[in-house]
Image: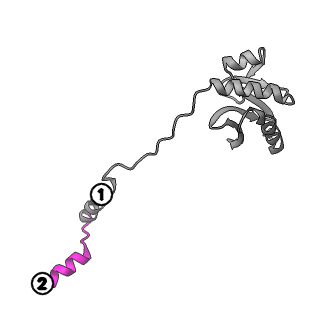
């Protein structure tokens, strides 16, 4: 069963005391972010928060389960009505998580366009094609 948009919006609202919380649709479910830090998921109308030692200190004894098959265990949050407790848990968790890495922009290799043009030119010559414009200019002399 997929998560309803209404439940995702409700959970996001409940977490607002922890900071700038956003919820993004990801792989049919929802990812939770505090600023740029990914800290949890909402899957099948259930809240999951990444496990950290700081989170364990705030909420000892929380059940741990993977949000989906093949995922690492996360804290399974069954009670989403206590805004204060959720804010403390998310604040502690995000405080321990590393900053996300800066995305690097991939640049084209220098000369890649020139190399491609040269390869296409060679391919044209191998097929017996001539450059029509150059041939016409030379024939007029």
Q: Secondary structure at mark 1?
A: helix
- Residue, far right: 81
Rendered image quadrant of residue 44:
top right
Q: Identify the residue position indicated by label 2 in the image.
A: 141
Q: Is residue 13 magenta?
A: no
Quarter in which the N terminus is drawn: top right
In this rendering, the answer to whether 137 lies above or below 87 is: below
Q: Position of residue 88 (x, y in %)?
A: 76, 25
Q: Colour scheme used in the picture?
A: one colour
Q: Position of residue 136 (x, y in %)?
A: 21, 81
- Residue, far left: 141
State the separation of the CA atoms marked 1 and 2: 30 Å
Q: Nearer the viewer, mark 1 or mark 2?
A: 1
Identify the mark at residue 114; answer none if there is no mark: 1
Residue at 77% in and 24% down: 76
Magenta-highlighted residues:
127-141
Rendered image quadrant of residue 139:
bottom left
- Which numbered disc flags the more N-terminal residue, 1 or 2? 1
User: Dot 1, crowdedness within 10 Å: few (<14), some or many (≥20)?
Assistant: few
In this rendering, the answer to whether 33 lies above or below 56 is: below
Residue at 12% in and 84% down: 141
Residue at 20% in and 77% down: 135
Residue at 68% in and 36% down: 33
Q: Secondary structure at mark 2?
A: loop
User: Dot 2, crowdedness within 10 Å: few (<14), some or many (≥20)?
Assistant: few
Q: Is residue 41 left or right of residue 97?
A: right
In this rendering, the answer to whether 124 lies above or below 10 is: below
Q: Is residue 57 left or right of residue 123?
A: right
Is residue 50 visible in the rendered image? The answer is no
Q: Nearer the viewer, residue 10 or 71?
A: 10
Q: Nearer the viewer, residue 18 or 123?
A: 18
């Amino acid at each position: 069963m997929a998560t309803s948009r209404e439940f995702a919006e409700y959970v996001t609202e409940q977490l607002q005391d922890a900071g700038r919380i956003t919820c993004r649709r990801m792989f049919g479910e929802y990812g939770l972010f505090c600023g740029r830090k990914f800290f949890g998921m909402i899957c099948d109308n259930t809240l999951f928060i990444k496990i950290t030692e700081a989170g364990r200190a705030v909420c000892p004894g929380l059940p741990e389960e993977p949000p989906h098959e093949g995922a690492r265990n996360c804290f399974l949050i069954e009670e989403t009505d206590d805004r204060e407790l959720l804010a403390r848990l998310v604040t502690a968790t995000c405080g321990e998580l590393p900053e996300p890495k800066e995305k690097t922009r991939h640049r084209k290799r220098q000369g890649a366009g020139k190399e491609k043009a040269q390869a296409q030119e060679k391919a044209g010559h191998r097929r017996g094609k001539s450059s029509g414009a150059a041939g016409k200019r030379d024939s007029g002399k």
